[in-house]
Image: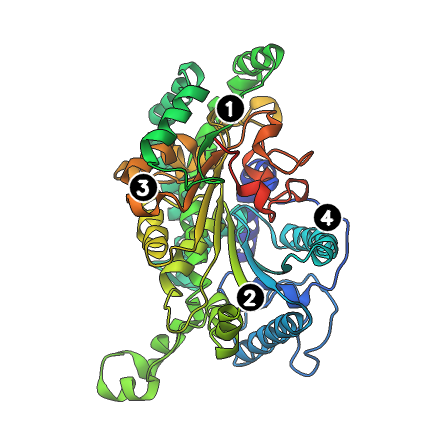
């Protein structure tokens, strides 16, 4: 009975989520190339622990076989040994690369949400292949050799929502309690969605009729002259691309609100039902990359019922956070890497797409000790799902301490952001960031809105301290406007999931830089 109920429930939820998951599969790319990716990928499971997508076994650490496997549920003492040996392989390969090149750029990339393990693996293969081609040309021209590390984490909406339904209770995993209480949680989610129908329909109605305010070129120029008092911001500053949408396309976008758009009456409550809880669990997973859920296990053992008595404290002692990303960053604290930076042989670039920007903000909070950690030369947020508050609390302090660091906030054009649609407009309009702001989150102030939307980010500009403004770029790509990707012929992102498509060449500085004003 339990199995029948569980399977039927899961199938029902997966059916509801399938439309949403297919929609957001645009957050990942399609891949056709194979490469030896093991030294360039840290693939972590929903606990922030095991390396799920690569076969890294203790007896055969050097295996380069790839194997798409599901992470086993058992948690044993082998986990730390496996991931430690894999990280050692990454570090050894990085050192070998530094020894063979005059200058190396370590590029740490974290993908966004709604990306399956399989899609993340495919995307890694393809991007790595193209960066390899880039490195041939870069070496010939004397530029830094790029050594990428891809942090692939389980961010699928379907699994995140099922975690909410079956496993996560009060921040901890409880399979028994989770299963027993799952019908109550499902009823509560249905009730929440039903009671919010006037609100969610209201958002859709407003989005259909509202006028999207877009600054013209003169107004953007005035914004730059207001916020910059000198000419030291070449390549930086505020830049808004042009909307070159044809009149025919504009008419079609308006017309689809009427017939297929009527299906939104059904899909909007469905999105609201799963969106909030799924989003909360995806946020949870970004935190577990640093401090794994398994780190808390000792406190769940019978001998540790009272974790604050003296005997328990003595037995536990001090423990590092052992999420996979924390382990990698601590491995990079080795003295030789600081020496490489001091001698200009090594630089570090951080790139986060969508929810990857949330991960990068947490990384900046945890690993910005000048006495231990590497310094980051370039920090790039693409369609950032982090909040403005995250930016103020993580990025601004780092820029204030590191005047040589540049920050780039890359967004869609505001019209493209609001009008993004799929399946002939049967889902609520707007990019993932619009959905987060309107459905999934509950902003207490405007600082709790997403940083990666132009209309949110431009307001934040006046609150940025003057001494760091010249280190920051705010750039909104135009609609069919080739001037906003300075790499000639390279793709211009028109949808939320297109920023890390390989034909944007998002790892190149010309993708980040704003045209000179």
Dot 1 falls on a residue whose secondary structure is helix
The span from disc 2 to disc 1 (Cα, nearest Å) is: 41 Å
Q: Is residue 514 above or below residue 142?
A: above
Q: Which residue is mark 2?
A: 346
Image position of 8 (left or right of 39): left
Between disc 2 and disc 1, the foreground one is 2
Left or right relative to 266: residue 194: left
> Which label is found at residue 470?
none
| Location of residue 11 (image quadrant) | top right
Secondary structure beneath label 3: helix
270 or 459, nearer to the observer: 459
Element class at badge 4? loop
Q: Earlier in the sequence, mark 1 or mark 4?
A: 4
Considering only order in the chain, which callout, 1 or 2, is on the residue closer to the N terminus? 2
Q: Tell me whether the residue at label 1 lies in contact with that at label 3, contact meaning CB atoms closer than 8 angstroms.
A: no
Judging by the rendered image, the residue that carries numbered circle 4 is 31
Residue 419: numbered disc: 1
Q: CA distance from mark 4 to mark 2?
A: 29 Å
Dot placed on the residue nearer the N-terminal end, 2 or 3: 2
Between marks 1 and 4, how big is the CA–CA gap?
A: 27 Å
Residue 71 picture location, percent across and down: 59, 65
The answer to whether residue 425 is above or below residue 35 is above
The secondary element bearing badge 2 is classed as strand
Answer with left or right where residue 459 lies relative to residue 9: left
Residue at the location (54% across, 38% down)?
Answer: 16
**Crowd class of label 4 (few under 14; some 14 to 19; many from 20; radius 10 Å):** some
**On the image, numbered disc 3 is attached to which residue?**
448
Badge 1: few (under 14), some or many (20 or more) residues near its Cα, within 10 Å? many
> In whole angstroms, how far apart are the C-alphas of marks 2 and 3?
35 Å
**Residue 443 image offset from top left, x and y in percent:** 30, 39
Task: Identify the mark nearer the N-term, 3 or 4.
Answer: 4
């Amino acid at each position: 009975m339990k199995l029948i109920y569980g399977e039927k429930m899961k199938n029902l939820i997966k059916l509801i989520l399938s439309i949403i998951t297919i929609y957001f599969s645009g957050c990942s790319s399609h891949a056709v190339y194979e490469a030896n990716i093991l030294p360039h990928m840290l693939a972590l499971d929903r606990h922030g622990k095991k390396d799920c997508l690569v076969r890294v076994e203790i007896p055969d650490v050097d295996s380069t076989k790839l194997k798409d496997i599901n992470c086993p549920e058992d948690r044993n003492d082998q986990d730390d040994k496996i991931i430690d040996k894999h990280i050692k392989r990454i570090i050894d390969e990085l050192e070998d690369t530094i020894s063979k090149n005059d200058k190396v750029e370590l590029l740490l990339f974290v993908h966004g949400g709604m990306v399956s393990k399989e899609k993340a693996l495919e995307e890694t293969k393809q991007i790595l292949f193209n960066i390899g081609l880039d490195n041939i040309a870069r070496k010939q021209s004397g530029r830094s050799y790029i050594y990428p590390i891809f942090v692939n984490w389980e961010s699928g909406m379907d699994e995140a929502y099922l975690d909410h339904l079956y496993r996560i209770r009060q921040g901890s995993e409880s399979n028994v309690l989770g299963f027993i209480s799952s019908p109550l949680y499902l009823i509560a989610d249905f009730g929440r969605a039903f009671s919010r129908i006037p609100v969610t329909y209201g958002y859709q109605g407003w989005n259909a009729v509202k006028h999207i305010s877009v600054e013209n070129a003169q107004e953007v120029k005035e914004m730059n002259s207001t916020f910059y008092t000198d000419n030291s911001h070449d390549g930086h500053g505020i830049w808004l691309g042009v909307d070159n949408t044809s009149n025919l396309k504009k008419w079609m976008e308006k017309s689809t609100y009427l017939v297929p758009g009527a299906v939104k009456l059904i899909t909007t409550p469905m999105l609201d039902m799963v969106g909030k809880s799924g989003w909360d669990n995806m946020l949870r997973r970004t935190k577990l990359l640093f401090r794994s859920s398994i780190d808390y296990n000792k406190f769940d053992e019978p001998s540790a019922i009272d974790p604050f008595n003296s005997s328990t404290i003595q037995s536990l002692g001090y423990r590092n956070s052992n999420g996979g990303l924390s382990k990698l960053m601590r491995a990079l604290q080795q003295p030789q890497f600081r020496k490489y930076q001091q001698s200009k042989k090594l630089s570090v670039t951080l790139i986060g797409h969508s929810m990857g920007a949330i991960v990068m903000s947490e990384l900046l909070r945890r690993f910005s000790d000048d006495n231990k950690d590497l310094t980051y030369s370039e920090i790039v947020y693409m369609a950032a799902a982090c909040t403005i508050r995250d930016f103020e609390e993580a990025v601004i302090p780092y820029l204030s301490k590191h005047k040589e660091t540049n920050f780039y906030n890359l967004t869609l054009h505001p019209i493209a952001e609001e009008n993004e649609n799929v399946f002939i407009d049967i889902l609520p309009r707007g990019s993932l960031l619009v959905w987060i702001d309107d459905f999934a989150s509950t902003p207490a102030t405007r600082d709790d809105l997403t940083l990666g939307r132009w209309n949110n980010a431009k307001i934040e500009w006046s609150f940025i301290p003057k001494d760091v403004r010249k280190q920051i770029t705010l750039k909104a790509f135009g609609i069919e406007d080739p001037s906003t990707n300075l790499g000639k012929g390279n793709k211009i992102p028109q949808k939320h999931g297109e920023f890390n498509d390989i034909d944007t060449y998002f790892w190149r500085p010309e993708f980040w830089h704003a045209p000179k004003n």
